[in-house]
Amino acid sequence: MTDIVDLRVGDDPLSSPRDTSPRDTSSPADVSTDGTDPGGPPGGASRARTAVVATVAGLMVCALLVVFLLPLSGRQRQQHRADEYQTAQSRLVAGDPAFVLQIPAIGLNTVAVKGAEPSLLRGGPGWREGSAAPGQGNTVVLGHSTLWEYSFGRLADLRGGARVYLRTRDGRVYRYKVNRVRTVPDGRTSVMDPGGPVRLTLVTSAGGPLDSSRTVVQAQADGPQPEVPARSRVKLVRGDQGSFDERGPGGLVLLLSGLLVVAIGAFGFVDLRRRYQLSTVLVVAGPAIALGIVLVLFNLDAFLPITF
């Protein structure tokens, strides 16, 4: 009988070659519908969602800081001024508490400092440099209506006849009576002319953050006023009073620096999120973003009206 040869174990060149290529063992579930590898980095839609969520969260944090952090910081500065005001001082320099301003009709009782630079207004009203000393001529005081300590937030509620009291650091008390409350455009700086009869002019923002109009309260002397000591008098210069928003370039530099830090932190957050867990990314990128946001918030007055 003829022996049967098993060709499956032989090396017969006429047999069909075996398929040695690797087989595809993936299941349909391993391939995403958009063609991306589920195990790889997130796709464009996921990154877009992350960016949107981060932007919304950032705006919410900014809003909370504006509502809570800035007023808290302003009140702390005002308290420091009130403590310092108790100490007598004959010569004042910029930033020193100059007088207490009281308007019972709107519940205002605040300490104003000498000078009205943006950094000084963060803790309360400021007596504008170049305007008259109390009892000498036109004393001009600027203050915030919305941000920081916003002590002038209710100036527009005043009506004619309301009483205003101003007590200087050396104990002199000046009394005024409101005779006019109006809104003026940004260029109407003649209301700050330091000369003329004894009076008090209070200035704050009238509209939103991009509105440069001002609420101006003008109050005339109410009865006899204390004599102004020679050391307290100010050299008055009539003419061009400059702008309501006199400020140096420092605030703008800090504002731009804050925006740059926020941008770098946000870019790092998105980039690191592709490779690391959220907790790790927050530890690395979070402080940079927080620092940038604080720099931006504390220097908003670099482009907003300084009395907003």
Image: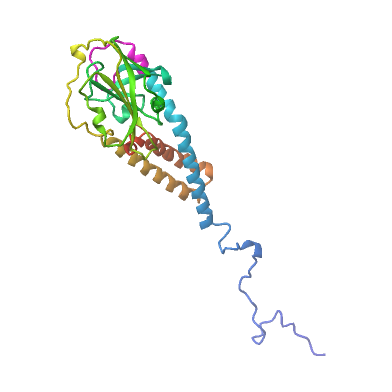
Q: Going 23% across and 24% down the picture, which residue do you hit? A: 131
User: Where residue 41 sits in the image (x, y, percent)?
Assistant: 52, 55
Q: Nearer the viewer, residue 195 or 234?
A: 195
Quadrant in which the C terminus is drawn: top left
Identify the image quadrant of residue 40: bottom right
- 81 falls in the magenta region: yes
Rendered image quadrant of residue 194: top left
Q: Where is residue 73 in the image (x, y as percent from the top left)?
A: 41, 26
Who is closer to the viewer here, 220 or 263?
A: 220
Residue at 53% from the left image edge and 41% from the top image edge: 279
How many numbered circles does the render carry? Answer: 0
Q: What x and y, as percent, mark residue 179?
A: 33, 22
| Spot occupied by residue 220 in the image (x, y as percentages of width and height) | 29, 19
> Would you say the magenta stretch is mainly helix, strand or loop?
loop
Segment tinted magenta in the rendering: 80-97
44 is higher (above) or lower (below) than 235: below
Q: Nearer the viewer, residue 160 or 236?
A: 160
Residue 45 among those drawn in magenta: no
Q: Is residue 45 among the parts visible in the rendering?
A: yes
The N terminus appears in which quarter of the rendering?
bottom right
238 left or right, relative to 99: left
Q: Residue furthest right?
A: 1
Q: Residue at image x 56%, y 60%? A: 37
Q: Which residue is drawn at 33% across and 39% down?
A: 303
Q: In this view, does 254 lie above or below 101?
A: below
